[in-house]
Image (tube, coloured by chain):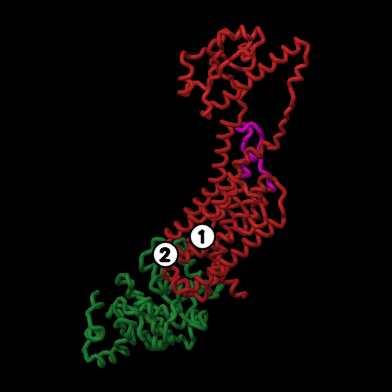
Amino acid sequence: MIQVENLHKSFGKVNALKGVSFTAPNGQITGLLGPNGAGKTTCLRILYTLLHPDQGWTKIDGLNPLKDTLEVQRHIGALPDSHGLYPRLTTRENIRYYGQLHGLRGEELEKRIDRLIQLLDMQDIELRRTDGFSSGQRVKVAIARALVHQPQNVLLDEPTNGLDVMSTRSMRTFIRGLRDEGKCILLSSHIMQEISALCDNIVILNRGEVVASGTPEDILSSTGKLNLEDAFVAAIGSEEGLER
Amino acid sequence: MKASLQRISIVYKKEVLDNLRDRRSLISALISTIIGPALLLVMIVIVGKTLLRDQTENKLKLHVVGAENAPTLMLFLKQNNVEILPAPDDPETAIRNGDLNIVLVIPEDYGVNFENGRPATVQVIEDSSRQSAFADIQRTTDLLENYTKIIGSLRLMARGISPTVTEALAVETVDVSTPQTQVLVFLNMMPYFIIMVVFVGGMYVIIDATAGERERGSLEPLLINPVARWEFVMGKVLASIPFAILSVFVTLSAFALAFNAFPLEEYIGYPMSIDLKALVGIFFISLPMIFLASAVQMIISSFTRSFKEAQTYIGFLPLIPALPGIGLAFMPVKARLWTMMIPTFGQQLLINQMMRGESINLLNIVVSTAVTTLAAVALIFVAFRLYQRERLLFGAK
């Protein structure tokens, strides 16, 4: 479970987050929706311990990232904004490196890698160096290495960005599969359709503030609109993020 | 602690494997290690050929005006491997233009003066500002002086006087420079090449593991793993060290090969070698500098955004310790205790002493090694702090 309470963060004069609060429960997909620059990535970076909040706090499975940094990192698997691979290592080696950093060893680790390769349908690229992979292949490897330690909480920053239709579909299926295992999933996107297709809960961010949150039904009723698209526009006050 | 060591070793192993697969940086590292010894060898061979080789084995071509006036002198010169040639009409212009190195003029009254025991004038036309003529001028004047001495001695003996009365002083020169120390003038540059390699050897690994990670976008996901920042720093610094050590080893081996296996004697006229024991000593003296170089490079790359940027800054790095090294080639500084307190400078002096086969103060080695190692440790701690910063993610402005 992920809890975020009154998060503030500024970079110089830019206030990226101005008091963001929400909760992402286990067994559900929570979507952070908002236009570019709304503060989604900053919020996620605070959650995966790379940035420290100026004010407010976050908790992951009840743990404080500022105090128990390593423990929090063991409870999360993240696909961050930039998810570069090591081009001189093979797919398997890229995943194995992260598994080892999580303290996994030997047969146990190899079995988990096998399972992820099967699950993400990567048999054809398993032993290839990742240099020259397509963006779909890259995202798959990045997700696999982020989940090799089977974290309870999964944070995905724009997971389907730059993927073609087929890859997007299989990514969505994969994410739903994780939810069905009871994991807590928090994903961000600036595309409304993406969020509405996947998420059980939606948190709409705009200019560093939560402008609406809840189930899709909650958001419809709170904005008084008939469909999510209109609700999104009403919430952020512009049509940004609707075009696909 | 055990878990920390394990994580450090995982990071270390990954970086070593990753960089071993980087053919391009391996090749460039190899070239940079061999360039020093090769350059030095070429310089010594060229200089040895032009300056140091014994000139008397060649026939000296001497252009003479009025050779017919002094047949005995000409005979003496011919016996001493000189070829007598007629001089051009305007010898002074020929010298000034550099067409000839030296012209000897024997006036018509030479014979009369010589027979009467008066100093017989001969003229040497030369351009002393011309370096390339130096050897010919020296040889000619030496021969003329010799001739004067021989004739003078003969004249004294003819008058029943021992020629030694004219020699008030018997000057004996004892030149302590062995052939080795003469060429060592060039070898003074060796510390410079070694420092270069110390700084370049592990450079690519450090840049790839820091600024390279940032540029590839692999830094952000890496830092989310449950590994303390200092563990990352240690793993990455340590990964650069075998590469740097290997580079220094290759360089020293190349030096050994260049001076011990290459037939230098043919080019500089005498045998020359580097003591293998000295090279082993130099290797160990270089080790603390490797730690220092890696630590400094780690700090610099924490600020840089891209591989190129890091390469630019870090590329300048070896110039800083190399400056005193270059100075050392011209203006020797004695190895004193205070010089050992300056990291890299102390080592350069020690390397120099080892090359010359001088006896080395053990305290100097201990002090320079200790100070440099401490400096490296202090810088590693600075790096720990820098890698804690949030800004690390973006590369600082």
Chain B appears in which tint?
A: red
Q: Position of residue A227 (x, y in %)?
A: 22, 87
Query: For this view, does A116 lie left or right of residue B59?
Result: left
Q: Are marks 2 and 1 on the same chain?
A: yes
Q: Position of residue A50 (x, y in %)?
A: 45, 76
- Residue A80 seen in the current view: yes
Circle 2 or circle 1, nearest the eye:
2
Q: Nearer the viewer, residue A109 or B114?
A: B114
Chain A appears in which tint?
A: green
**Point 55% across, 42% down: residue:** B38
Asked if residue B60 is positioned above or below residue B365 in the image, the reply reads above
Asked if residue B81 is positioned above or below residue B240 in the image, the reply reads above
Which residue range is magenta in the image?
Answer: B254-277
Q: Quadrant of the N terminus of chain B?
A: bottom right
Q: Which kind of residue does numbered mark 1 sit on? A: Val
- Say which element carries label 1: helix
The residue identified by callout 1 is B205
What is the crowding at mark 1: few (fewer than 14 residues within 10 Å), some, or many (at least 20)? many
- Say which element carries label 2: loop
What is the crowding at mark 2: few (fewer than 14 residues within 10 Å), some, or many (at least 20)? many
Q: Quadrant of residue B356?
A: top right
The residue identified by callout 2 is B305
Query: For this view, does A127 lie left or right of residue A108?
Result: left
**Point 63% across, 18% down: residue:** B144
Q: Which mark, by number, is residue B31? A: none
Asked if residue B283 is positioned above or below residue A15 in the image, the reply reads above
Which chain is home to disc 2? B
**Point 64% across, 31% down: residue:** B269
- Residue B193 seen in the current view: no
